[in-house]
Amino acid sequence: TLQEERAAASEALLKGRSDALQEQEASAKACEELKAALAKAQQDCRKAEAALSQENDHRQQQEDSAAQDVHRMADKLRNAGVENDRLERKVAVQEASLETRLA
C-alpha cells in the first residue's frame, strides 16, 4: 500500500540520515585527532629545533675557543722564536768576546 511504501521510504531516509550523521561524527573525530597529532608534531619540531640550535651554539663556542687557543699558541711560538733568536745573538756575542780574550 501507499502508506507502507511511504513508511519504508521514511525509514530508509532516516537510516540514511543516521548513517550520514555517524560518518560526519567519525570524520570530525578523525579531524580532531589529526589536528592534535599535527600540534604535537609541531611542538616536537620546535623542541628539536631548539635543541639543535643549542647544540650548534655549543659547537660554535668550542670552535671559537679552539681558534683562540691556536692563536695563543701561535703567539707563544712566535715569541719563543724571537727569544731564541735573541739568545743565539747573545751567545754569539759572548763567544766572540771569549775568543777575543783568549787570543
Image (cartoon, helix red, strand yellow):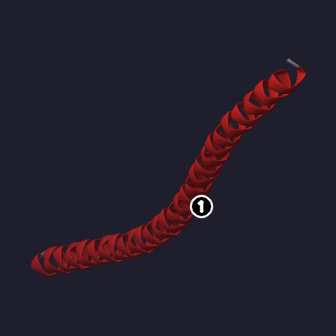
Q: Quadrant of residue 8?
A: bottom left
Q: Quadrant of the C terminus?
A: top right
Q: Amino acid at mark 1?
A: His
Establish if 75 lies above or below 103.
below
Q: Residue at x 35, y 75 (%)?
A: 22
**Most distant residue in the right direction:** 102
Query: In the rendered view, does 99 fall on the left or right side of 90?
Result: right
| Residue 81 picture location, percent across and down | 66, 37
**Most distant residue in the left direction:** 2
Q: Nearer the viewer, residue 53 or 47?
A: 53
| Residue 80 picture location, percent across and down | 70, 41
**Crowd tier of the residue under label 1, counting other residues whose Cα lies within 10 Å: few below 14, some 14–19, many 20 or above:** few
Q: Nearer the viewer, residue 18 or 94?
A: 94
Q: How many marks?
A: 1
Q: Residue at x 61, y 48 (%)?
A: 75
In what element is the residue under mark 1?
helix
Q: Nearer the viewer, residue 39 or 53?
A: 53
Q: Which residue in the structure is indicated by mark 1?
A: 58
Q: Quadrant of the N terminus?
A: bottom left
Query: In the rendered view, does 89 fall on the left or right side of 103?
Result: left
| Residue 96 picture location, percent across and down | 76, 25
Query: In the rendered view, does 53 fall on the left or right side of 74?
Result: left
Establish if 96 lies above or below 40.
above
Q: Quadrant of residue 54?
A: bottom right
Q: Nearer the viewer, residue 80 or 27?
A: 80
Q: Residue at x 51, y 68 (%)?
A: 50
| Residue 13 picture location, percent across and down | 20, 76
Q: Quadrant of residue 79?
A: top right
